[in-house]
Amino acid sequence: MKRTTKANNSFITISILTAFLLMLTGLLAGCGQGSDKKGNNGAGGVKTAETKNSHGSAEGDADTQPEDKDESTVYPFTITDSFDRKVTLEKEPQKVVSISPAVTEIVFALGQQDKLVGRTDYCNYPEETAQIESIGNLMSPNIEKIVDMEPDVVIASAHFQREVLQKLEDAGLTVVILYGEESFEGAYEAIGKIGDLLNARAAASGIIDDMKTTVADVEKRVKGKEKPSVYYVVGFGELGDFTAGKDTFVGQMIEMAGGKNAADDVKGWNYSLEKLLEKNPDVLICSKADHQKEQLKTANGYQDLDAVKNGKILEMDKNKLEIQGPRLANGLKEIAKYIHPEAFK
């Protein structure tokens, strides 16, 4: 079948150039190196022992936090971040700048939002983030504005630019970069470590436990069921077709939800309309915010898919899948309930 290049320009601008950029930077993917890699203690509960600093007082470190995951963080607290830097917080932070949508969402979920003095333009959940001053975009935030905020800590995520780090450190600011594998374990680590940094370990543990309970429940309900093929719509049009390949976390979540990722024959995010038409998936997942559902009904090629003809299109908040934060488990459940409604009656 010969492919045409007719496209909706507004969709291309909003959906591909924005959402796809965020996924490529990894900032939607959150953070959290595994403690087995970096040796950090988090709300996940790595066993630790107390040591003394040069002043003779208890010092919080990757190896010095209490074994009880519900105990308070001991300051000074030292963490080894994802740039393999040992960063020490002398006291509990009261002013935080977030350079990641995932970090911002986690800080709110921990109940620590009163500490947030700065966030990026892309930090838009929950709605209350609009009341927090923006420091600009993800890749090149406004350094002067961040410095003027006088934060106790700046928390960044994946693909944070080293030149930005250097400028912030030259200004005397404390910066922690947290990111890791794209998985639920990575999300748990992110939540746990931010809980450690902000002295919110009990809240972090509660969030992680709730997420694990939801994930286990979903997997139990869909176990052994027939797996419909599911295609995740990231972008389409004259700039190309984008989806979640077999090596992406979104692709893994489709499988966990009891589906078969229709794009499990590729890695990364690039796909082709020809392959999609050949696969002819049972279900499409698309973005509610970008109004993709209506566009797919008339889009070249997509309008011929059985999923579109049968109305099997799940329109959802894609941040529940793309931002590795507390809402991931809800996103997993939403997919599972759509493709296996009988399992949730």
Image (spheres, helix red, strand yellow):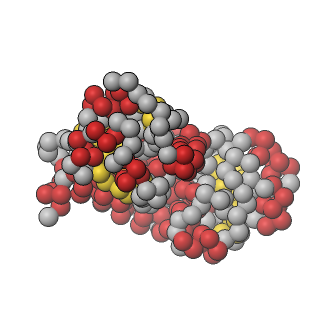
Give coordinates of residue 51: x percent, y percent: 63, 55
Name the quarter where the C terminus is drawn.
bottom left
Query: From the viewer's perspective, is 99 left or right of 258?
Result: right
> What residue is rendered at 46% in x and 59% in y?
289
Direction top: furthest residue: 1
Query: From the viewer's perspective, is 230 left or right of 178?
Result: left
Position of residue 89 relative to residue 164, above or below, is below
Is residue 251 visible to the viewer in this orientation of the structure? no
Q: Which of 239 and 166 is in front in this view?
A: 239
Position of residue 255 relative to residue 290, above or below, is above
> What residue is rendered at 53% in x and 62% in y?
106
Give coordinates of residue 79: x percent, y percent: 63, 51
Query: From the viewer's perspective, is 141 left or right of 127?
Result: right
Figure quadrant of residue 199 = bottom right
Name the quarter where the N terminus is drawn.
top left
Q: How many numbered marks, from 0 up?
A: 0
> What residue is rendered at 35% in x and 36% in y?
301
Q: Which of 208 and 55 is in front in this view?
A: 208
Is residue 174 visible to the viewer in this orientation of the structure? yes
Give coordinates of residue 46: x percent, y percent: 48, 51
Position of residue 261 relative to residue 114, above or below, is above
> What residue is rendered at 51% in x and 49% in y?
11
Give coordinates of residue 310: x percent, y percent: 21, 49
Q: Which of 83 and 156 is in front in this view?
A: 156
